[in-house]
Image (cartoon, grey):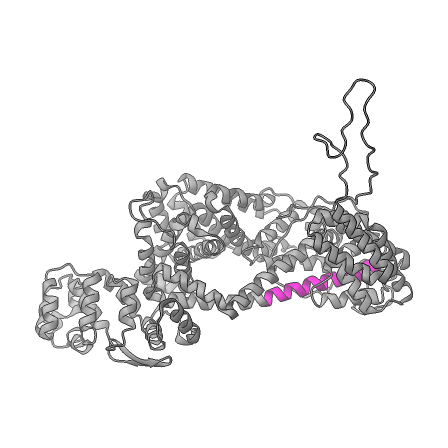
């Protein structure tokens, strides 16, 4: 990430005259007003995130080549020549840069500005190194000035065709994007100086020049050039109105890039939601390794991959576009330009929701805190509640995403590396400067993370946080999620394997607020898992995965939680657990390792995920793309269309969860739910065809009442799973209330129910159950 800007001293603009009318894209009569001080802006609002830039370096000048070293006559050592060890001095221009500059000069001589600009771009792409591109721009300074002069002359007499303007400006903008800060500054200075010579003070008439940039802005191109040239026209050459005209095109370009990202991000969110639904629905019948295979196959599908890659590319483009223009926009925003202010705020708001650029949003917020002029100007635009708006709309969504990025980047470095990275992102927000309330909240968050790591953050304090949950702002909830997300990640074994973690988990999983907090933690950690090679450090996720599993189990067990938490929230939580379990499945070690919980965790996590997502709480079949599910399950598991239909509908009916509670393994569950020869619970002739053959729930309940679990339950169902009618009579027999299952559950004594069942069931079924007459009942089955 690029470091925050150290601002250049720029001349303040002249005091603003009366407000100008709303600016338009087409040339307008000269308006002697500083852009941005009007009460309105044509910029449309957007959504999310931050970036940090280095200040452009001063333009370099050509340095004469040093003379060859000569022997000294005073007895001292001779001077070192370039290339000799220890020589310190100017570095010769690389030969490839010299050749590139010669090609640019020749292109201008033969084809003018258009040919030279194209050659400059192509040579810069070939060099593919900001330092070398900067050197090329130094060597080509005279040709760049000629190009700038041609552009300015076209403005002076409106003689340059818009298409030529567009191509030249497109190539120059592309070159600037390949250059370093000094190179960008060199090109912008040349263009701005020549334009200032061509445009009278007070005029905003740039004719085909800004029209061409406006056309490029429609494709999200040109903001690097236009923002830098605009800032120089306004602050270095006193051409305020002309600079405003260019700034409008820069804002438009950023706005276009942002809108494109938001549309693609929304499309990706729908695809991810569908994946979550599919994984959660099918989870009971998939092993962790199969979950991972399913995810891989899902993202290998052409449409899904295209949507994912398009959103990622659009986010990268928005980040790069902002990075190239942020310094100039922040300068102008601090001077009161509303277009620059809104472009910055709305674009960083958009990036705040991305898992790989949210850190830029936090750095932007930190720069606001450290730049009194910028903070004051933004308060002037957004009102007295600006700090709250910044907190809720940018910082709150950015914090967990940036934390996920820090954890992913830390990798095997674990908590220490992740904490160092995260601390560097929030350091600009920990000390109150221009922001008054936010810094204190960040200091408290960092203190609480350290307290969790030390085992001194008490369950009582966690409970106090949950008690005030409903009154917390979006930022307050975000910081709480970040506190536990990073605090519990890679928790030291002496805490993870002891009573401390259990006490924290118990506190967080006994209230609706705790479930919401846990869902946020799992979402954050899930993004980190998806962004990294967790096979090398996945065990560090286990304390948080255990928290997620406990939260789902608590939701199933406690009616009060079901009344206070939406099924959708739990659905997302379970999807996060299943997905992350799939991420870490490939590395989980066997029993006997240093982390004892690892040996049994994955199976337990998947076991508790199932129920609430099926039956009443699960996604309807209309939420599935059955064709997609069929293709993936055919590819990964070799299932036929009929088996896919059986699996999807049977898990929808809740049978997957019921079988989990009987202790069956995912492969066993899948085998029973997809059995076609002979059909067991239902018949299917193919996709879209499902015919229920009976209700298997009485069989499941009878097995639980007899304490038949695991492999024994699986073998029993293979043999007798189609005899549902026989079991319905003993579960719902109105003439034997004393021997009912309900009475057994109420009293805790299952002996009367069992004896009655053995009397009523067919002899072969009764003989299979008789060995369990005195076995402990599986009462946990009835608690879910």
Image quarter of residue 120: bottom right
Horizontal side of 579 relative to 147 (left or right) equals: left
**526 horizontally vs 722: left or right:** right
- Which residue lies at the image location 48% right of the left edge and 41% below the top edge? 416
User: Residue 228: percent from the left, percent from the top?
Assistant: 76, 54
Q: Is residue 594 visible?
A: yes
Image coordinates for residue 350, horizontal then vertical, percent: 60, 60
Q: Position of residue 412 (x, y in %)?
A: 46, 45
Residue 245 included in the magenta stretch of the image: yes
Numbered marks: total = 0
Q: Is residue 91 magenta?
A: no
Q: For the stretch drawn in magenta, what is the main secondary structure?
A: helix
What residue range appears in magenta? Answer: 242-263
622 or 29: nearer the viewer: 622
Q: Is residue 406 above or below residue 382?
A: above
Q: Which quarter of the image is occupied by the C terminus? A: bottom left
Measured along the vertical axis of the image, is residue 210 above or below residue 437? below
Pick the residue in front: 478 or 676. 676
Give residue 28's position: percent from left, percent from top. 84, 68
Outermost residue, top direction? Answer: 75
Q: Nearer the viewer, residue 561 or 147?
A: 147
């Amino acid at each position: 990430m690029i470091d925050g800007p150290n601002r250049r001293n720029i001349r303040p603009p002249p005091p603003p005259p009366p407000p100008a009318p709303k600016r338009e894209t087409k040339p307008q009569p000269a308006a002697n007003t500083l852009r941005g001080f009007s009460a309105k802006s044509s910029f449309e609002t957007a959504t999310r995130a931050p970036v940090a830039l280095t200040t452009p370096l001063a333009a370099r000048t050509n340095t004469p080549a040093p003379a060859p070293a000569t022997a000294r006559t005073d007895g001292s050592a001779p001077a070192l020549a370039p290339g000799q060890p220890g020589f310190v001095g100017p570095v010769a221009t690389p030969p490839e840069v010299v050749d590139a500059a010669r090609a640019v000069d020749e292109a201008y001589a033969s084809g003018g500005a258009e040919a030279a600009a194209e050659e400059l771009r192509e040579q810069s792409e070939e060099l593919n190194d900001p330092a070398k591109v900067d050197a090329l721009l130094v060597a080509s300074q005279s040709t760049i000035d000629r190009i700038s002069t041609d552009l300015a002359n076209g403005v002076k007499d409106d003689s340059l065709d818009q298409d030529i303007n567009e191509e030249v400006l497109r190539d120059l903008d592309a070159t600037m994007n390949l250059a370093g800060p000094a190179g960008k500054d060199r090109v912008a200075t040349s263009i701005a100086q020549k334009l200032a010579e061509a445009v009278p003070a007070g005029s905003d008439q740039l004719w085909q020049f800004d029209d061409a940039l406006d056309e490029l802005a429609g494709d999200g191109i040109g903001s690097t050039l236009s923002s830098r040239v605009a800032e120089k026209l306004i602050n270095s050459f006193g051409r305020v109105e002309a600079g405003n005209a260019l700034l409008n095109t820069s804002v438009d370009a950023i706005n276009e890039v942002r809108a494109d990202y938001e549309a693609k991000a929304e499309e990706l969110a729908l695809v991810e939601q569908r994946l979550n639904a599919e994984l959660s629905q099918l989870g009971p019948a998939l092993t962790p390794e199969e979950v991972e295979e399913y995810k891989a196959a899902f993202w290998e599908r052409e449409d899904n991959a295209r949507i994912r890659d398009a959103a990622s590319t659009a986010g990268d483009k928005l980040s790069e576009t902002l990075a190239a223009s942020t310094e100039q926009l922040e300068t102008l925003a601090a001077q009161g330009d509303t277009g620059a202010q809104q472009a910055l705020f709305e674009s960083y708001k958009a990036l705040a929701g991305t898992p790989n650029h949210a850190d830029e949003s936090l750095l932007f917020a930190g720069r606001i805190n450290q730049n009194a002029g910028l903070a004051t100007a933004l308060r002037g635009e957004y009102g007295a509640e600006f700090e709250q708006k910044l907190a809720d709309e940018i910082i709150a969504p950015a914090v967990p995403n940036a934390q996920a990025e820090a954890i992913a980047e830390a990798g095997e470095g674990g908590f220490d590396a992740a904490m160092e990275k995260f601390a560097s992102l929030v350091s600009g927000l920990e000390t109150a400067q221009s922001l008054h309330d936010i810094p204190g909240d960040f200091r408290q968050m960092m203190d609480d993370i350290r307290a969790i790591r030390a085992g001194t953050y008490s369950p009582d304090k966690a409970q106090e946080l949950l008690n005030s949950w409903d009154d917390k702002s979006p930022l307050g909830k975000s910081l709480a999620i970040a506190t536990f997300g990073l605090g519990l990640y890679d928790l030291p074994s002496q805490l993870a394997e002891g009573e401390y973690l259990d006490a924290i988990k118990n506190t967080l999983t006994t209230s609706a607020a705790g479930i919401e907090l846990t869902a946020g933690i799992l979402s954050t950690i899930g993004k980190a898992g998806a962004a990294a090679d967790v096979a090398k450090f996945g065990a560090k996720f286990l304390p948080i995965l255990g928290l997620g599993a406990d939260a789902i189990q608590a939701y199933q067990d406690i009616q009060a939680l079901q009344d206070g938490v939406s099924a959708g929230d739990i659905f997302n939580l379970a999807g996060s657990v299943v997905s992350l379990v799939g991420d870490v499945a490939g590395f989980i070690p066997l029993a006997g390792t240093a982390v004892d919980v690892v040996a049994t965790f994955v199976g337990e996590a998947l076991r508790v995920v199932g129920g609430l997502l099926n039956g009443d709480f699960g996604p309807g079949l209309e939420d599935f793309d059955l064709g997609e599910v069929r293709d993936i399950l055919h590819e990964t598991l070799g299932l036929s269309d009929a088996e896919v239909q059986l699996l999807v509908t049977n898990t929808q009916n809740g049978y997957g969860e019921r079988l989990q509670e009987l202790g069956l393994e995912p492969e066993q569950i899948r085998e029973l739910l997809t059995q076609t020869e002979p059909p067991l619970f239902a018949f299917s002739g193919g996709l879209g065809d499902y015919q229920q053959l009976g209700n298997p729930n009485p069989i499941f309940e009878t097995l639980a009442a007899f304490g038949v679990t695991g492999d024994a339950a699986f073998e029993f169902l293979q043999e007798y799973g189609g005899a549902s009618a026989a079991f319905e009579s003993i579960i719902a027999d109105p003439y034997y209330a004393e021997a009912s299952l309900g009475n057994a559950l109420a009293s805790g004594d299952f002996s009367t129910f069992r004896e009655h069942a053995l009397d009523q069931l067919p002899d072969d079924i009764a003989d299979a159950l008789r060995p369990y007459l005195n076995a402990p009942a599986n009462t946990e089955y009835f608690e879910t």
